[in-house]
Image (cartoon, helix red, strand yellow):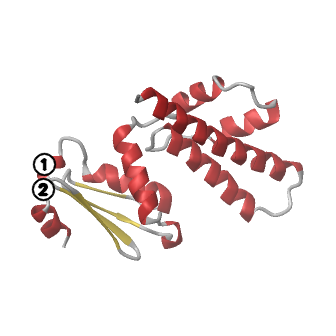
């Protein structure tokens, strides 16, 4: 099915998500910009799966279907991915170091500990970290101050994601 769609639409990418597997086909006219394994990597980073394949076709596992992003989120992720370079942990930490006012030391430590490499541009990268901290906080047993610090850090990541998106918009004008 994916190969058929890929052949019919050489200037597009096709993403098919089944309950436990994602499939991606990239048309020949788009291969200079997008590789199917890169798209699978973005999807897998949300669902906890793994995958790979050739430049024009890839597949990946979806161990937790509840984490499959919505169609709108996928479109936003891929738009961000193709328009913004991938950010490493070190690049995100360097950007966070430029934020003013500087967060309190305890929150700053939480932010630094939560950042990891992810296949995203800056705004999506920061939003992902906020979501991960919030999800972890929701699953946590009572932790008092520790839980409060995680929630503050999640809120800071959300705020920083909006700041990064606004800065990105200003730099494109």
The residue at which mark 1 appears reads as 29
Instruction: Name the residue located 56 percent from the left edge and 49 percent from the top edge.
Output: 128
Residue 43, compared with residue 169, is above or below; it is below
The relative height of residue 79 versus residue 121 in the rendered view (above or below) is below
Label 2 secondary element: loop
Residue 47 falls left or right of residue 105:
left
Residue 50: image location, x then y, percent: 40, 59
Label 2: how many Cα within 10 Å (few below 14, some 14–19, many 20+)? some
* Count of numbered badges drawn on the protein: 2
Q: Which residue is mark 2?
A: 10
- Locate residue 57 relative to residue 119 in the image: left or right: left
Left or right placement of residue 143 versus residue 118 in this view: right
Q: Marks 2/1: CA distance?
A: 5 Å
Mark 1: secondary structure:
helix
Q: Nearer the viewer, residue 59 or 158?
A: 158
User: Does the CB distance between marks 2 and 1 fall below 8 Å?
Assistant: yes
How far across and down, in percent of the image, does residue 32 sit? Answer: 18, 41
Quarter of the rendering occupied by the N terminus: bottom left
Tell me the quarter of the picture where residue 113 sits: top right
Label 1 Cα crowd, 10 Å radius (few <14 / some 14-19 / many 20+): few
Mark 2 or mark 1: whose residue is earlier in sequence: 2
Q: Quadrant of residue 157?
A: top right
Q: Residue at x 86, y 56 (%)?
A: 143
Residue 88: x percent and y percent?
A: 48, 34
In this rendering, the answer to whether 32 lies above or below 16 is above
**Residue found 23% across the figure and 42% down from its top:** 33
Residue shown at 77% from the left, 37% from the top: 107
Instruction: Check the image and name the residue furthest to the front.
Output: 173
């Amino acid at each position: 099915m994916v190969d058929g769609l890929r052949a019919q639409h050489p200037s597009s990418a096709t993403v098919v998500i089944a309950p436990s597997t994602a499939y991606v086909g990239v048309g020949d006219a788009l291969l200079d910009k997008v590789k199917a394994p890169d798209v699978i990597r973005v999807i897998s980073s949300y669902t906890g799966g793994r995958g790979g394949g050739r430049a024009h076709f890839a597949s990946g596992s979806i161990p937790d279907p509840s984490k499959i992003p919505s169609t709108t989120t996928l479109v936003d992720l891929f738009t961000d991915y193709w328009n913004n370079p991938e950010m490493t942990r070190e690049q995100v930490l360097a950007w966070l170091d430029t934020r003013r006012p500087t967060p309190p030391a305890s929150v700053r430590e939480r932010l630094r500990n939560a950042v990891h490499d992810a296949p995203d541009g800056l705004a999506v990268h920061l939003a992902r970290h906020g979501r991960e901290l919030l999800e972890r906080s929701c699953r946590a047993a009572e932790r008092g101050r520790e839980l409060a610090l995680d929630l503050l850090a999640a809120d800071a990541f959300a705020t920083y994601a909006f700041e990064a998106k606004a800065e990105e918009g200003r730099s494109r004008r």
